[in-house]
């Protein structure tokens, strides 16, 4: 469902993402782990057509994001790490806007808005201006926006930032349910516990390169660490470099 | 079409919600409405008076009024071109909602047209607003009637869409061609572009012709020059010709010029849409690549430490931080190019003044012009203060908590902002007045009086800028350039202009007496100190009020913010 074929993104001499090959099948909940500045957000932005790869191709549902951006993006929902919401719109107006961008028919749109607001406990606030929302409420509204058109692919960048434990739990359950129903969830995070708890497979990226990928068992064997948890595996796999200058813009 | 409307909907809904749900209290809205009406009426009255004066000039009235219309439209055109460049960069490449919108299956063509519309509206509404009383004055003086208004309604949309699409086109090409990591260079280019465009467009309008008929040798030649546009290839000239056709008895082919205008107004957006579809996504992708590897200027820290040495430790730390932020924020320092253009045009005006061709004695005229110059310099200073002093407190932005929670007095912060703005403003004001007075060849006493007055005025103007900026802080902004466009910015401008007006009035009387005396006697009289002293004392007193009151009010407001008793961004 998601294919990254030899994707590279260079900022001058520096490769933020370097020859990345990745395949995520339908219905998989894929965790994308990496230290700060490893290239996670750059990868996600290329997947969503926000950044152009220097070379390589990204396919969503078989559609090349560069060649057929509208078809590719129609399949995906995106939850960015620092989402923007129009502060002077109400929650409901924001969702209507996003739904219309995704060409959701009016009746279905109203139904989806009601469902999602109810599920993420925002119904009471739907007619309030977004500027009056708390950080967690805004996050939940963005999740509603990403799911409004019932996407086949959900791309999520650092979803738990600013979420309270209850919100975090709701979100994790939501991702699991979506995956069970066939949605492919690409979850970028540096929260190891989240990845360990919900993901079927995990890819670890460091300095733009995918250094490990597989199930928890696969990662254990790659790290030659048979007993530890994901945290110790992650630390072992990513331990080598004396972090040479984190790159802005990644 | 439907998808364009969808893309425009957040702007419309945001505006509607802000209007209906309280963004601003009603008394403030009424005040703004009254202010707008006042400005509108004032513009109408001034332009009408000028046009009536033109009309009274035998045979030449319509020709002069036509040239005046050309100059106005040319000036507006250049302003539109520049503001569209900035607005297009923001709307197409820097807006915060781009990730949201472009991660959806949005059609790029619809996206282009929706952003073209918002760019056009954002950068043109003010020009349109101020052009209406001007057209109303033309209609009133030259009896344009309904036909004229009809032509205005037909011409204006086309007139504003051309610079808008040109601005969008240039922005696309710049972002595509230049490495976007050097986005500050793009803005630098914009600054230069705006400056050069303004300068050339102003020069093209040949405004000095209006007061130099003798250059033409013969009356008929003069009249003929007055009746033709300075540049036939500018949309502003075509618009002027269409409008003049229904105002004056001219042999203009209105339909031809309108067709010309319409063809360009249709062609440019279309051509730009082709360019946009070809280069936009690459350009936008580039625009997100953050700059890195900034060159460290070794001399900067010691220089700043040296410059700020006279100030106590805390204001000094804040000043150094502010100067560094200013130098590293392209949106701030690129405004200096506008300032440069302003100064050049300002001084150029004095250079081309035909002082020796007027019936008034040169000395009298120089004194009168020098006096007007003081007011003009004050207006320039207040315009600059709005750009730099007014946003000073707001620029602390979302990092204001740092100052709020630090063991420092907000008074230190406000005063550091005051001095940081006062010094460059003083330099600018003194330079403007000195150079223009040199061009005017004013006597030494007048030079001294002007320099002292500007010195005092700068205190007041800076304090009003910083004080009102603190009174109405706006800590959440996308672009520093948008801070002065707030309600507080309007208030600041009004107070500044009022302050300058009162200063000028206080000084006007003795200078007026003096000018009349030189006119009657025909010889230059150096005024006695006792004539000038009372007005200078008055100005000193007024300046003290203008410094103390706004700064104190601003400080009180910031203290309230610290106590959580009020909210910013109103």
Image: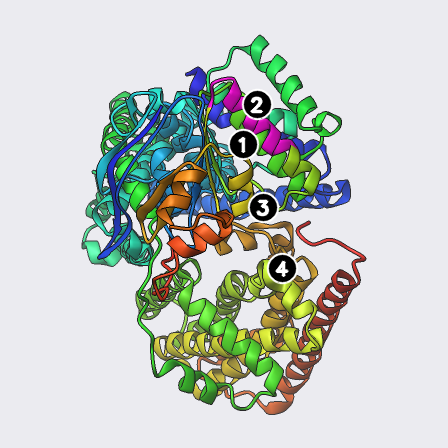
Residue wearing tag 1: B11
Q: CA distance from mark 2 to mark 3?
A: 21 Å
Could you tell me which secondary element the residue under label 1 belongs to?
helix
How far is the residue under mark 3 from the one under mark 1?
Answer: 28 Å
The residue located at (31%, 57%) in the rendering is: B195
Q: Which mark is residue A161?
A: 3
Report the magenta residues as a range. A170-183
Mark 2 crowd level (few <14, some 14–19, many ≥20, 10 Å Cα): few
The answer to whether one can see residue A242 in this image is: yes
User: How far apart are labels 4 and 1 at the CA level?
Assistant: 27 Å
| Whether residue B376 is situated above or below residue A5 in the rendered picture | below
Q: Position of residue A8 (x, y in %)?
A: 25, 44
Residue located at (62% from left, 14% from top): A110
Residue lying at 31% horizontally and 69% vertically, measured from the top left: B351
Q: Circle 3 — which element?
A: loop
In the picture of the structure, the residue carrying the numbered disc 4 is B492
Q: Nearest the camera: B540 or B173?
A: B173
Q: Residue most toward the front?
A: A226
User: Is the residue under label 1 in contact with that under label 2 (CB below 8 Å)?
Assistant: no
Q: Which residue is mark 2?
A: A177
Q: Residues within 10 Å of mark 1 (few under 14, many from 20)?
A: some
Chain of the residue that carries numbered disc 1 in the rendered image: B
> Chain ID for label 4?
B
Which chain letter goes with mark 3? A
Report the label total: 4
Residue B43 relative to residue A114: left or right: left
């Amino acid at each position: 469902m998601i294919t990254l074929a030899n994707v590279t993104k260079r900022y001058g001499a520096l490769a933020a993402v370097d020859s990345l090959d990745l395949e995520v099948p339908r219905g998989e909940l894929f965790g994308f782990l990496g230290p700060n500045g490893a290239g996670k957000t750059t990868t996600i932005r290329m997947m969503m057509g926000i950044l152009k790869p220097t070379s390589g191709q990204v396919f969503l549902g078989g559609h090349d994001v560069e060649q057929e951006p509208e078809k590719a993006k129609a399949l995906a929902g995106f939850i960015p790490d620092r989402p923007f919401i129009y502060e002077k719109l109400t929650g409901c107006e924001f969702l209507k806007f996003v739904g219309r961008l995704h060409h959701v028919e009016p009746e279905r749109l109203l139904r989806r808005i009601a469902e999602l607001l109810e599920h993420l406990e925002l119904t009471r606030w739907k007619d309030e201006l977004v500027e009056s929302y708390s950080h967690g409420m805004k996050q939940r509204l963005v999740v509603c926006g990403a799911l409004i058109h019932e996407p086949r692919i959900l791309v999520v960048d650092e979803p738990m930032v600013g979420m309270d434990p209850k919100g975090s739990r709701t979100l994790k359950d939501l991702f699991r349910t979506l995956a069970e129903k066939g949605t492919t969830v690409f979850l970028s995070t540096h929260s190891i516990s989240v990845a360990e708890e919900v993901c079927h497979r995990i890819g670890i990226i460091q300095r733009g390169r995918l250094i490990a990928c597989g199930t928890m068992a696969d990662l254990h064997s790659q790290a030659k660490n048979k007993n530890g948890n994901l945290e110790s595996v992650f630390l072992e796999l990513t331990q080598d470099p004396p972090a040479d200058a984190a790159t802005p813009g990644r | 079409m439907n998808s364009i409307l969808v893309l425009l909907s957040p702007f419309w809904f945001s505006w509607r919600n802000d209007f209906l749900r309280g963004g601003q209290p009603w008394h403030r809205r009424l005040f703004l409405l009254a202010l707008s009406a006042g400005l509108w009426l004032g513009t109408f009255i001034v332009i009408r008076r000028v046009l009536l004066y033109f009309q009274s000039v035998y045979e030449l009235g319509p020709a002069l009024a036509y040239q005046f219309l050309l100059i106005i439209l040319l000036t507006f055109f250049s302003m539109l071109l520049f503001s569209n460049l900035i607005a297009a960069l923001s709307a197409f490449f820097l807006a915060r909602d781009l990730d949201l919108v472009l991660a959806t299956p949005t059609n790029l063509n619809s996206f282009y047209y929706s952003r073209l519309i918002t760019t056009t509206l954002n950068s043109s509404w003010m020009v349109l607003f101020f052009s209406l009383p001007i057209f109303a004055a033309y209609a009133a003086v030259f009896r344009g009637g309904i036909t004229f208004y009809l032509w205005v309604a037909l011409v204006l949309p086309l007139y504003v869409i051309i610079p808008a699409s040109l601005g969008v086109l240039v922005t696309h090409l710049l972002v595509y061609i230049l490495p976007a990591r050097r986005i500050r260079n793009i803005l630098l280019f914009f600054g230069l572009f705006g400056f050069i465009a303004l300068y050339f467009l102003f020069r093209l309008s040949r405004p000095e012709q209006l007061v130099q008929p003798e250059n033409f040798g013969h009356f008929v030649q003069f009249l003929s020059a007055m009746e033709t546009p300075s540049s036939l290839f500018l949309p502003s000239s075509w618009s002027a010709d269409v409008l003049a056709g229904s105002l004056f008895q001219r042999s203009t082919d209105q339909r031809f010029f309108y067709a010309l205008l319409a063809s360009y107004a249709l062609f440019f957006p279309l051509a730009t849409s082709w360019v946009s579809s070809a280069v936009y996504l690459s350009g936008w992708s580039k625009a997100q690549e953050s700059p890195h590897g900034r060159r460290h200027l070794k001399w900067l820290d010691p220089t700043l430490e040296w410059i700020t040495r006279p100030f106590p430790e805390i204001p000094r730390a804040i000043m150094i931080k502010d100067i560094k932020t200013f130098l590293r924020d392209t949106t701030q320092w690129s405004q200096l190019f506008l300032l440069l253009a302003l100064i050049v045009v300002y001084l150029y005006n004095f250079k081309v003044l035909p002082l020796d061709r007027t019936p008034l004695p040169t000395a009298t005229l120089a004194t009168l012009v020098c006096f007007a110059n003081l007011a003009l310099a004050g207006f320039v200073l207040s315009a600059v203060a709005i750009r730099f002093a007014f946003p000073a407190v707001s620029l602390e932005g979302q990092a204001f908590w740092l100052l709020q929670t630090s063991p420092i007095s907000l008074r230190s912060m406000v005063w550091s902002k005051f001095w940081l703005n006062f010094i460059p403003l003083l330099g600018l004001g003194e330079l403007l007045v000195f150079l223009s007075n040199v061009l005017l060849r004013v006597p030494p006493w007048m030079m001294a009086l002007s320099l002292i007055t500007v010195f005092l005025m700068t205190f007041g103007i800076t304090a009003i800028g910083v004080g009102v900026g603190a009174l109405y802080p706006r800590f959440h902004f996308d672009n520093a350039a948008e801070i002065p466009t707030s309600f507080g910015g309007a208030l600041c401008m009004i107070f500044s202009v009022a302050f300058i007006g009162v200063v000028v009035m206080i000084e006007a009387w003795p200078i007026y007496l003096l000018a009349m005396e030189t006119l009657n006697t025909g010889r230059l009289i150096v005024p006695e100190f006792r004539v000038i002293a009372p007005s200078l004392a008055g100005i000193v007193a007024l300046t003290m009020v203008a410094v103390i009151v706004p700064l104190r009010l601003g400080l009180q407001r910031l203290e309230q913010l610290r106590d959580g008793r009020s909210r910013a961004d109103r």
